[in-house]
Image (cartoon, rainbow, N blue to C red):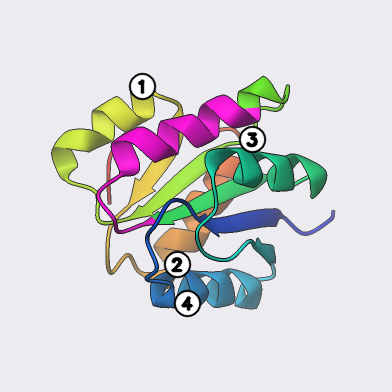
């Protein structure tokens, strides 16, 4: 069986990339192939890269407070390209936003300080098409 392929991205004007780099490394260390798009991506560039790279999951890192706008736009852009790639969101996300994000198509939400094993488990669960209905 081929390794899971995950695209990790920073969408919008959020320039804080330490956390996403840590997540990329821990996923890689778990045997998951990681494609990192870098900072300041648009929902459309993330969707295009995810489809072009044939990834199993998209991981978004957001600390800017724009998660309610940008994360659903990534889901929409992916679907507009005819793909159904699960999107996992990590970062600063208030608990009251999690249910609405799930309704908008976000497969799972991970909060700050999520343990490495939880991050890996969430990504592999999303890749299998299962959704988590709570925030971490």
Q: Residue at x 79, y 50 (%)?
A: 53
Q: In the image, which disc is placed on residue 85?
A: 3
Mark 3 surroundings within 10 Å by alpha-carbon count, few (fewer than 14), some (14 through 19), many (20 or more): many
Mark 2 vs mark 4: give the one in front.
4
| Helix, strand or loop under label 3 | loop
Q: Pinpoint residue 17: horizontal percent, then vertical percent.
A: 43, 72
Q: In the image, which disc is placed on residue 55?
A: none
Q: Are marks 3 and 4 in contact (CB under 8 Å)?
A: no
Residue matched to label 1? 103
Q: Is residue 128 left or right of residue 23?
A: right
Task: Evaluate whether residue 132 shows in this view.
Answer: no
Nearer-N-terminus badge (3/2) = 3
- The quadrant in which residue 86 appears is top right
Nearer-N-terminus badge (1/3) = 3
Majority secondary structure in the magenta region: helix
Segment tinted magenta in the rendering: 62-78
Q: Is residue 17 left or right of residue 75?
A: left
- The quadrant in which residue 135 appears is top left
As drawn, 58 above or below 75: below
Q: Does the magenta segment cover residue 71?
A: yes
Residue matched to label 4? 22
């Amino acid at each position: 069986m081929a390794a899971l392929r995950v695209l990790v991205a920073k969408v919008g004007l959020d320039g804080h990339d330490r956390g996403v780099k840590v997540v990329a490394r821990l996923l890689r260390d778990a045997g998951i192939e990681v494609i990192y798009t870098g900072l300041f991506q648009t929902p459309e560039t993330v969707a295009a890269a995810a489809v072009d790279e044939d990834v199993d999951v998209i991981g978004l890192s957001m600390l800017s407070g724009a998660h309610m706008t940008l994360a659903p736009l990534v889901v929409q852009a992916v679907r507009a390209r005819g793909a159904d790639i699960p999107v996992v969101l990590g970062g600063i996300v208030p608990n009251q936003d999690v249910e609405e994000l799930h309704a908008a198509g976000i497969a799972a939400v991970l909060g700050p300080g999520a343990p490495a094993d939880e991050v890996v488990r969430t990504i592999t669960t999303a890749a299998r098409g299962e959704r988590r209905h709570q925030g971490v």
